[in-house]
Image (cartoon, rainbow, N blue to C red):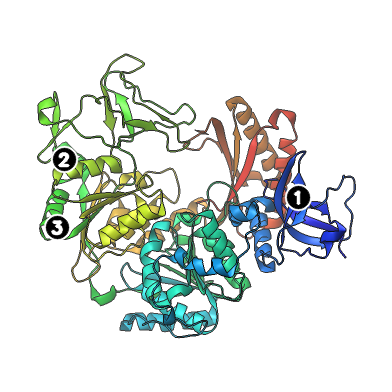
Amino acid sequence: MPRFADVVLPVPLPGLFTYALPEDLATQAQAGCRVSVPFGKKRTTVGLIARLHNTPPTGIDVKHILDILDASPVILPHQFALWQWISNYYLCSIGEVFKAAVPSKMKNRPTPCSSCELESLSSLTGKVTNRQALLGNGGEYGSLPHLSPAQSTALASIHEQWQQQPVCLLHGVTSSGKTELYIHLIAEAIGRGQQVLYLLPEIVLTSQLTDRLRAVFSDRLGVYHSKFSDKQRADVWQRQLTHEPYDIIVGVRSSVFLPFQRLGLVIVDEEHEVNFKQQEPAPRYNARNVAILMASRAHARTLLGTATPSFESYYNARLGKYGLVRLAERYGLVQLPNIEVVDVKEMRRKRLMNGAFSPNLINAIRAALDAHEQIILFQNRRGYATQVQCHVCGWVPRCPHCDVPLTLHHGAWRFSRQEDLTSTTELGGFSAKETSLPSHTSQTLTCHYCGYTTPIPSQCPACENPDLRPHGFGTERIEDDLSRLFPQARVARMDLDTTRTRTAYEQLIDDFAAHRTDILVGTQMVTKGLDFEHVSVVGILSADTMLHQPDFRAFERAFQMMSQVAGRAGRRQRQGKVFLQTMDARLPLISQIVAADYEAAYHEQMLERRQFAYPPFTRIIVVYLKHRSAVTVDALAREATLMLRGHFGTRVLGPDEPPVSRIASLYIRRITLKLETSLPLTPVRKLLLDTRSALLTQRFYSSAHIYFDVDPL
């Protein structure tokens, strides 16, 4: 009978915590069960048994487990092994993985999964069609979609590639019918009695997709993401441990942590998306890469699908590490959209721009509205204006806690009417006042990093001038301008501010799909795999915000994002029209986007990356250092760099300041390691962790925060 248990606690501390097992609980204890344990002087918390043994720890006063919360494990052995890999590879504690992986309700109290609860689980997937469309594992399906000859050939090629490699990259142009292929592959997997994980990069994509999947697979489909309540996510987790788990899970990156008992297929849709990478907090994992590893360990197949593969994935496919299948034609042989490049610099010089809109775009929107067609406009900035500035002295309000200007949000902001103007700029039939901002209770200045908000000052605090003007265009301002330019049009906005809840984003998509909305304005949410039948015009309002980022992946992301949003146009009978507005019309990347020449963009960027030793030719680990004192963090960064150079030599770059060098009152410095892909990672990780420990044990740096971002995006 075991006397001790090593327990994982949801805290950012390394290692496991050993507790004594009372005799009355020893017979109930199992690895993978949750336990209630004391932690600290007065706190109790929920942990997870990782290991049972009879070896007493030395040199510590061992506390006793208070209670065992489960009759059977809630974490399967292969799940815990995956947690350990994530902790090791991404240089974080196993407790941080536990905290991120398990729904909060399961870290607070028992969540028994009764038969009553299981019956209510159908509500998680929304509307449920005829349950008899799919009768158990390997049962009957609803009608599978018809495949075109090109799709049938691609499906056969995927199976052929899987005979050689367990991972296959499906490079299919936008609207080529990748989802239909996924449905056929899912049906095959379920017919073999296997489970399927269908990963998406964005919650907003789940609504359209689940409707399509549910029409075929009925209520054997589960959905898992953060817009569901914590109880709902805990119920999905518990159902996956029963004898009747969901056969298909559709979800975002956290879905990789769910228990799968018979995983056979993993689909990573839009595999290039940066949203698969967790940024804050730890673990800073890439769900695409974790899913590939998870599938490999389960002897399952993985399909990576996208119209614009990440350059790393395409590199792996060209090396033969992944299989590669191309689907080069759109479903129904519809042509790719015609992309017209608009030189905004020239348009502004000739005074032809109406706010953020070129004349050609305005005319195309008007023609589409007259033809009862729809329009998508992409602006990768939310809010009303990127900043507010004093017209006299140039003062710009900045966040007191972060090193960024505050963004103007207006809520019910509206331009003044013509009769109120003192100086105006014509905007296609209405006039926008540019002299000052009228006092308005709904206007706020907001920091997009820490959430700080403040009202707009009535005058400049530097020179007391009341003339404060908005600069730049966010999605709110675009929406507002459209309502004035096209008062008859029904305009909706899709960004972080309008999609806070599941019902909000579902309503936006449903309204646009049902043509209750004419124009959809959005941030990058509108670029990701949405399928709307009546969209004939797409406008990319400012390509330059993507092109001029201090990041070696900036051109890759710009190509992907603009190609993806362009692909929303003309997805049925007729060729669509795209207007790409940029200040750098002569860039080679712009012509590559126009020609849909992925290969040219890939080869050009690979030449640069090889020359300057960037991934996939090297592996990058970034060390972040944070402190409330700029003096302290600078000293810490210098000392850390010296220590790391003693181990890694010229592989160490920095220290430097990131583009935003202070967030939430913490000053930030970073050190970058460029490592050869052949370098063994185990000693690298040990040296990094030992360096961090050595620094944080110094009294001067004890309140600093040091963490690692492995394979940053």
Can see residue 93?
no
Residue 262 % position (x, y): 59, 76
Residue 243 % position (x, y): 60, 76
The residue nearer to you, when weighing 168 against 589, is 168
Residue 713 % position (x, y): 49, 51
Of discs 1 and 2, which sits in the foreground?
1
The residue nearer to you, when weighing 309 against 666, is 666
Disc number for residue 354: 2
Can see residue 309?
yes
Q: Is residue 513 left or right of residue 702?
A: left
Q: CA distance from mark 1 to mark 2?
A: 64 Å
- Residue type at tag 2: Asn
Residue at the top extreme?
463
The residue identified by callout 1 is 37
Disc number for residue 368: 3
Of discs 3 and 2, which sits in the foreground?
3
Q: Secondary structure at mark 2?
A: loop
Disc number for residue 703: none
Q: CA distance from mark 1 to mark 3?
A: 63 Å
Q: Is residue 486 left or right of residue 380?
A: left
Going 28% across and 41% down the picture, which residue do you hit? 476
Q: Secondary structure at mark 1?
A: strand
Number of numbered discs on residues: 3
